[in-house]
Amino acid sequence: MNNLFLSDCYDTSPETKQSFLSKITLNSRFYFFARTVWIFYLVARCARRGLLNRDNQVHYSNKNIWTIEHCGAKIHLRGLDNLDAENGPYVIVGNHMSSVETAVLNAIIGPRLLFTFIFKRSLLKVPYLNSALRTQNAIAVDRVNPREDFKTILAEGKKRLQNGCSVLVFPQSTRCFELIPEEFNTIGVKLARNAGVKIIPMALKTDFLGHGKIIKDFGPLDKRKDIYFEFGAPITVEGNGRDAHRQVIEFIRSRLEAWNKV
């Protein structure tokens, strides 16, 4: 498996140059999205051929890393050694800002942990994408009835954890550049407690990619804003899980506060 991130930390090399096509399109979103859509097509085609295994998921996610860095972004990763497969699986709980994390997390987490995630069931109607989602054993929810979604995540998440597959959870109801604790639900803590596994808190800052006015994913790029990911030490869920939930929120809050001062 081709792992770009072999150590606990990673920083984009200062020698990384912006690509020619990104420069001549004035660092606009169009080159960036043309490349990411093409990579998405390759992933989906690979899935439809029955070839989208873990290695290939990492391979295509590495291509997204290349695209982001060569569109002028600087990526900083910390705490990768906390993704320790020998002591897993885990529930990974983090904030959610943009589609950048969707594009790169297979490259970051995949070489260290087998993992899956939660997605909106309606995406199964999208040609090609449905094949990729099924291949990754992702958990589908309807986003209509929160109570039923909660039951689905607990039941299906526990099955995957029992089979050694970590589960990535974004407790915020929507992508947001700010952390609002009141909107950060406890589903990750409850899943970890129900399955008897630990939580890894994940803080991220991916506002390099802004939110589009018409299409949320199709936003402007701001290469002045670096991209950050940090994974905390595993947290044991005890009692009602409130303390673990508080620790996750505090981990994310403290990292965002520090990164916003850079």
Image (cartoon, helix red, strand yellow):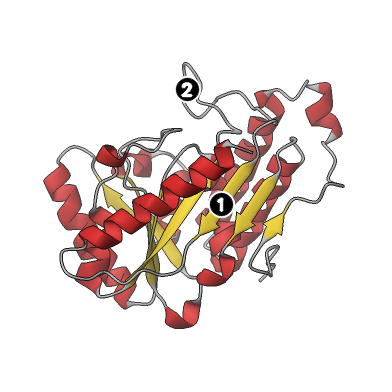
Residue identified by numbered label 1: 229
Does residue 210 lie above or below 203 as drawn?
A: above
Residue identified by numbered label 2: 215
Query: Disc 1 on helix, strand or loop?
Result: strand
Quick check: 199 left or right of 156?
A: right
Does residue 174 lie above or below 1 as drawn?
A: above
- Quadrant of the drawing holding the N terminus: bottom right
Which residue sits at x=50%, y=76%? 84
What residue occupies the far left of the structure in this picture? 147
Crowd tier of the residue under label 1, counting other residues whose Cα lies within 10 Å: few below 14, some 14–19, many 20 or above: many
Crowd tier of the residue under label 2, counting other residues whose Cα lies within 10 Å: few below 14, some 14–19, many 20 or above: few
Q: Nearer the viewer, residue 65 or 188?
A: 188
Front: mark 1 or 2: 1
The image position of residue 136, as x and y in percent, is 44, 60
Could one spot residue 170 in this view of the protein? yes
Query: Disc 2 on helix, strand or loop?
Result: loop
Does residue 105 lie above or below 206 as drawn?
A: below
The image position of residue 254, as x and y in percent, is 46, 48
Q: Amino acid at mark 2?
A: Ile
Instruction: State which quadrant residue 31 falls in.
Output: top right
| Disc 1 to disc 2, C-alpha distance | 25 Å
Q: Amino acid at mark 1?
A: Phe
What residue occupies the far top of the structure in this picture? 213
Which residue sits at x=36%, y=44%? 124
